[in-house]
Amino acid sequence: MTFSFHRIPVGICNCFLLRGEQTILVDGGAMGGLPAFKRILTELHIEPGEIELILLTHGHWDHITCLDDIQRMTGAKIAIHEKDRFMVETGEPPFPNGVNGYGKAMSALAKGILHPHLPKLKVDTVIPDAGMSLRAFGIPGEVIYTPGHSMGHVSIVLDTGDALVGDMAMNDWYLRLSPGLPILADDIRLVVESWKKILPLGIKRVYPAHGLDFPVEVMQKEIANFK
């Protein structure tokens, strides 16, 4: 079975294309990212209609702002965990809480000025707490329930040792100067427990939604030192 995956920056959010027997897009992108999404699909010689599923790590606004446009382009179905389903179906996702001083200030500011009213979209597949396999799509990996950043957050762990972790980790300059735990989370201790759940699964490299990928040893140290 041939498998590949590609990072597609869609605004400030990294989306990922998983290509096996079928093609899955992970996350729906942030404001202003649609032209880049179209350009990279063209560069990869991928027709939008090849994407059959849009799998959301969670429902915060920066992961679903381009979702309506992308779904109309592709005709793909939408999958998200039950606890974040309302964010897609109401089009009014909340902003997460801050963890440290900087995160708390960012959260307070965002909650004051960001009031997204996105198109209300139908969720086709509800991901349960038990997660779901991607092998039916010809993709060697599993979707694992990893709550904490949001209560319906999921991560994708691939047999290759690559983990697409959404906002379970952050690595972009406006969030963190170096990779590590998120500065925004509804329950940071639950984020840590979710990391403890997936770290033993043979992860070698971490792919966050914000910033570039980095070796798993960074998160192993973060979790070991968390208090």
Image (cartoon, rainbow, N blue to C red):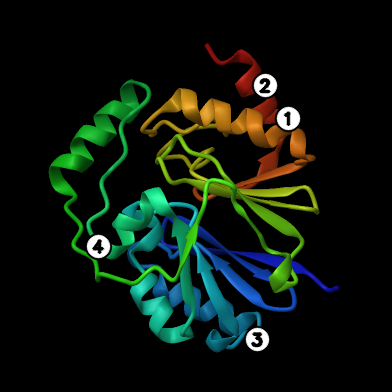
Number of numbered discs overlaid on the protein picture: 4
Quarter holding the N terminus? bottom right
Amino acid residing under circle 2: Lys
- Left or right: where 31 falls relative to 222: left
- Of helix, strand and loop, which one carries label 4? loop
Question: What's the CA distance linking mark 3 and mark 1?
Answer: 34 Å
Which label belongs to residue 217?
A: 1
| Mark closest to the chain's N terminus, 3 or 1 | 3
Residue at image mark 3? 45
Against 161, residue 25 (above or below) is below
Picture coordinates of residue 56, whole percent (x, y): 48, 59
Residue at position x 67%, y 37% in the image:
198
- The amino acid sitting under disc 1 is Glu
Residue at which label 2 appears: 221
Q: Tell me, yes or no, whether the two marked residues, 1 and 2, touch with CB atoms within 8 Å.
A: yes
Mark 4 or 3: in front is 4
Q: Residue at x 50, y 31 (%)?
A: 191
Q: Residues within 10 Å of mark 2 (few under 14, many from 20)?
A: few
Q: CA distance from mark 4 to mark 3?
A: 31 Å
Amino acid marked by disc 4: Gly
Say which residue label 4 marks. Answer: 91
Query: Which one is in front in this view, the residue at disc 4 or the one at disc 2?
Result: 4
Q: In the visual, does 47 lie left or right of 3?
A: left
- Tell me how far mark 1 sits from mark 4, CA to CA: 37 Å
Instruction: Return the residue nearer the eye: 67 or 152.
Output: 152
Which amino acid lies under the numbered mark 3 shown in the image of this protein? His
Question: What residue is rendered at 58% in x and 85% in y?
Answer: 42
